[in-house]
């Protein structure tokens, strides 16, 4: 497998549909990371949760079922990033070990993701320590913004990382480091690049299997990306621009740095809770940008039928590829004929599928151009 891309997903139905329809050539270059969604407020619970005696376990099991349906026989990274470090399911098992054991039992090759941000929680530290990592092909250490801040004192960051590795007896050569900047909507590309580079520089002597840089430029609502309703425009994917800068730097050429992002939804986006006032939108991934066709509230006017017109804007643009490019592209073409479902989740699946098809190709083309220039892109 030639790993090029790690999409950070939320284990929702829409992402399951996107992965189900992903072509083998794209699948061969990715390992998805699934952030298990947090429990919604009780007033938002669907019936299957409100009638369950073990709602936490039930919701997590639903997410695991989705993951297994598309990742059986494949590697899948899994994290409880949105849960407290001491979280357990109702049966008493810590969520960390529960996720790994359940995925393994469902035929998925689990890649545990260890959270730097949760290491101070004794319950979390204990749960992480009981897993036999020697039997797993890969483990990941996730460094979020707290670790990026700690990299201002490199000795502190190295000490903390050493503590994690020593506690669980993990060899760096079998562990990857995910540098997750999270929301970078208000950040500039140089700041993102420099911050991630500082972490890589502090840890490159450990001999980790690879580094991954990840972030998301997308705001939680489309009005912050495209200001005017019923209009179209480009929005820069700063996470890709930063990765390209990092990959061609001296630091990037010494280390394998994989590209990661949050696909077409930001890290703080709505996690499957219906919003009757949400805007219609199609986020079509293009080189280093999104081309976004924004509509209006689905509670107004033509409601969900507006997506047919939005799809026409995508097809009429200079950016649309062709229906055969991906399942998502085929659905956009069908929408121009009024032949697609009228659901937000469907369009999340469409946008995500096109994105996960486009990104590995974008990375390959970037590496080819750099090779012609005499650079080695670390993929």
Image (spheres, rainbow, N blue to C red):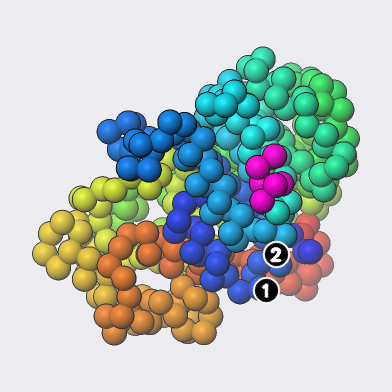
- Residue 121 is one of the magenta-drawn residues: no
- Give the side of residue 32 with respect to residue 264, left or right: right
Front-lying residue, 166 or 288: 166
Q: Which residue lies under the disc numbered 1?
A: 25
Front-lying residue, 23 or 207: 23
Work out which quarter of the rendered image holds the C terminus and state it: bottom right
2 and 1 marks in contact (CB < 8 Å): yes
Secondary structure character of the magenta stretch overall = helix
Among the 4 quarters of the image, the one containing residue 336: bottom left
Counting other residues with Cα less than 10 Å from the Cα at mark 2, is it few (<14), some (14-19), or many (20 or more)?
A: some
Q: Secondary structure at mark 2?
A: loop
Measuring 38% from the left and 64% from the top, which residue is drawn there? 346
| Gap in angstroms between the C-alphas marked 2 and 1 | 7 Å
Q: Which residues are magenta?
A: 101-106
Q: Which residue lies under the disc numbered 2?
A: 29
> What percent of the width, then of the height, locates residue 352?
48, 62
Measuring 25% from the left and 75% from the top, which residue is drawn there? 309
């Amino acid at each position: 497998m030639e790993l090029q891309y790690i999409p950070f997903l939320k284990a929702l139905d829409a992402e399951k549909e996107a992965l189900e329809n992903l072509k083998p050539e794209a699948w061969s270059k990715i390992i998805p990371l699934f952030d298990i969604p947090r429990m919604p407020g009780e007033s938002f619970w669907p019936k299957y949760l409100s009638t369950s005696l073990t709602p936490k376990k039930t919701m997590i099991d639903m997410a695991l079922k989705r993951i297994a349906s598309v990742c059986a026989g494949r590697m899948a990274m899994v994290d409880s990033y949105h849960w407290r470090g001491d979280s357990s399911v109702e049966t008493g098992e810590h969520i960390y070990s529960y996720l790994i054991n359940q995925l393994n039992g469902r035929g998925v090759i689990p890649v545990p993701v260890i959270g730097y941000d949760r290491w101070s929680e004794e319950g979390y530290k204990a749960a992480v320590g009981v897993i036999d990592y020697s039997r797993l092909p890969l483990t990941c250490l996730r460094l979020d913004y707290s670790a990026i801040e700690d990299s201002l004192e490199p000795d502190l960051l190295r000490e903390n990382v050493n503590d994690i590795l020593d506690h669980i007896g993990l060899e760096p050569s079998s562990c990857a480091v995910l540098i997750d900047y999270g929301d970078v909507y208000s950040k500039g590309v140089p700041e993102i690049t420099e911050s991630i580079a500082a972490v890589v520089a502090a840890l490159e002597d450990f001999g980790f299997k690879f580094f991954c840089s990840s972030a998301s430029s997308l705001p939680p609502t489309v009005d912050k990306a495209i200001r005017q309703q019923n209009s179209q425009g480009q929005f820069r994917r700063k996470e890709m621009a930063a990765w390209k800068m990092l990959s061609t730097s001296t630091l990037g050429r010494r280390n394998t740095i994989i590209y990661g992002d949050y696909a077409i939804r930001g890290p703080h986006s709505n996690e499957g809770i219906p919003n009757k006032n949400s805007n219609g939108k199609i986020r079509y991934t293009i080189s280093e940008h999104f081309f976004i066709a924004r509509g209006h509230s689905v509670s107004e006017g033509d409601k969900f039928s507006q997506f047919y017109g939005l799809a026409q804007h995508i097809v009429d643009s200079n950016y649309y590829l062709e229906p055969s490019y991906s399942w998502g592209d085929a659905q956009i073409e069908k929408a121009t004929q009024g032949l697609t479902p009228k659901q937000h989740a469907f369009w999340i699946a469409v946008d995500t599928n096109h994105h996960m098809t486009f990104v590995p190709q974008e990375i390959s083309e970037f590496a080819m151009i750099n090779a012609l220039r005499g650079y080695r892109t670390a993929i």
